[in-house]
Amino acid sequence: MIGNTAQELMITIKACINQEKTYYTRASRHKFKELLARIHHKSVGIRWISKSLKTLEDAGYIRRRCRYVHFENGNILQRPSLFWFTYKGALYLRRTLVEGARELLATMRNRPGANNEPPRQKEHHQLDEYRKLYPGEMARQKRTREI
């Protein structure tokens, strides 16, 4: 049994997936907090969102993939995790009559290995993308290496 916050979080994840037009979302816990406040008028803390995400993951409704960027000087930067629905999670959304759940279920049936398959885009682990997004961090890394 999952709580109200976890159910609202599943709906929020589904909305993020629809907006990004992929089968996963890159939204951070802070973004989930903002969306829960705006869409569901619910004010919760970051720790409660983390616990709710863990509850959903333990129940088998969502999967998560942690992402990191490794720099040449040994520093590691954590990026927001990727979240996607399992087949069980899509069935749960359909049973609770969430809008768009039927289409999500149809796309999962057409994608082999959709239940456990993590997103496979190369961009999630490449340093070049990070350099484009955060050029100041790369310059700071270079300065500390030179010293």
Image (cartoon, grey):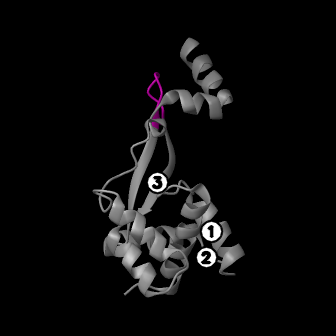
Residue 28 vs 12, above or below: the answer is above
The residue singled out by tag 1 in the image is 33
Residue 145 screen position, x and y as percent: 54, 16
Residue 130 screen position, x and y as percent: 57, 33
Residue 44 vs 131, above or below: the answer is below
Mark 2 or 1: in front is 1
Quarter of the image containing the N terminus?
A: bottom left
The span picked out in magenta is 69-76
* x 32%, y 54%: residue: 117
The answer to which of 124 and 96 lies nearer the viewer is 96
- Could you tell me if residue 27 is visible in this image? yes
Q: Earlier in the sequence, mark 1 or mark 3?
A: 1
- Could you tell me if residue 54 is visible in this image? no
* x 71%, y 74%: residue: 38
Mark 2 touching mark 1, by CB under 8 A? Answer: yes
CA separation, marks 1 and 3?
16 Å
Residue 129 vs 49, above or below: the answer is above
Mark 2 or 3: in front is 3
